[in-house]
Amino acid sequence: MSPDLVARFFEGDLPKGDAAAVARVAGIMGAKKTAELIPLCHPISLSSVEVQLEPSAHGVAITATVTTQGQTGVEMEALTAVSATALTIYDMVKGVERGVTIESVRLRKKEGGRTGTWERPEVVD
């Protein structure tokens, strides 16, 4: 995203309206619908889904935090939330700037479940 588009995104100054609010809702809905979208992914009762959007060097950084009381991980729900958010952002801004890209969807941290805690090592570019 161009710096101008990032600013417009966070100001809510886009032809389709408040893209950030719409994208957050899409992410929450995506997390809740994961079992319907991902084959063989079992449905999980979610306790909470939070989607955060922050300006980054060349766009919008998306972070999804998903929790459950169940004894399983919810990393697929978090990754689906981020993906749905990113796709919604693209849809909301494509009329202004077609060259926007979606990059680097990845798990940063997982706690609980059968395998316990896992955290991605920090990589310095």
Image: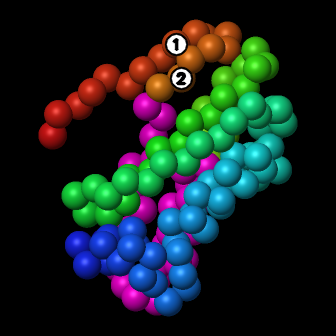
Q: Position of residue 23 (x, y in %)?
A: 57, 64
Q: Which residue is mark 2?
A: 110
**Would residue 85 be found to the left or right of residue 58 on screen?**
right
In the image, residue 42 above or below residue 20: above
Q: Is residue 108 visible?
A: yes
Camera-nearest residue between 9 and 44 = 9
Q: CA distance from mark 1 to mark 2?
A: 5 Å
Q: Position of residue 4 (x, y in %)?
A: 25, 78
Mark 2 residue element: strand
In which quadrant is the C terminus drawn?
top left
Q: Is residue 100 visible?
A: no
Q: Position of residue 9 (x, y in %)?
A: 40, 73
Q: Position of residue 106 (x, y in %)?
A: 45, 40
Q: Residue furthest left?
A: 125
Q: Residue at x 59, y 43 (%)?
A: 50
Q: Which residue is mark 1?
A: 117
- Whether residue 98 appears in magenta in the rendering, the answer is yes
**Would residue 4 be found to the left or right of residue 20 on screen?**
left
**Would residue 39 be found to the left or right of residue 103 on screen?**
right
In which quadrant is the N terminus drawn?
bottom left
Q: Residue at x 81, y 32 (%)?
A: 44
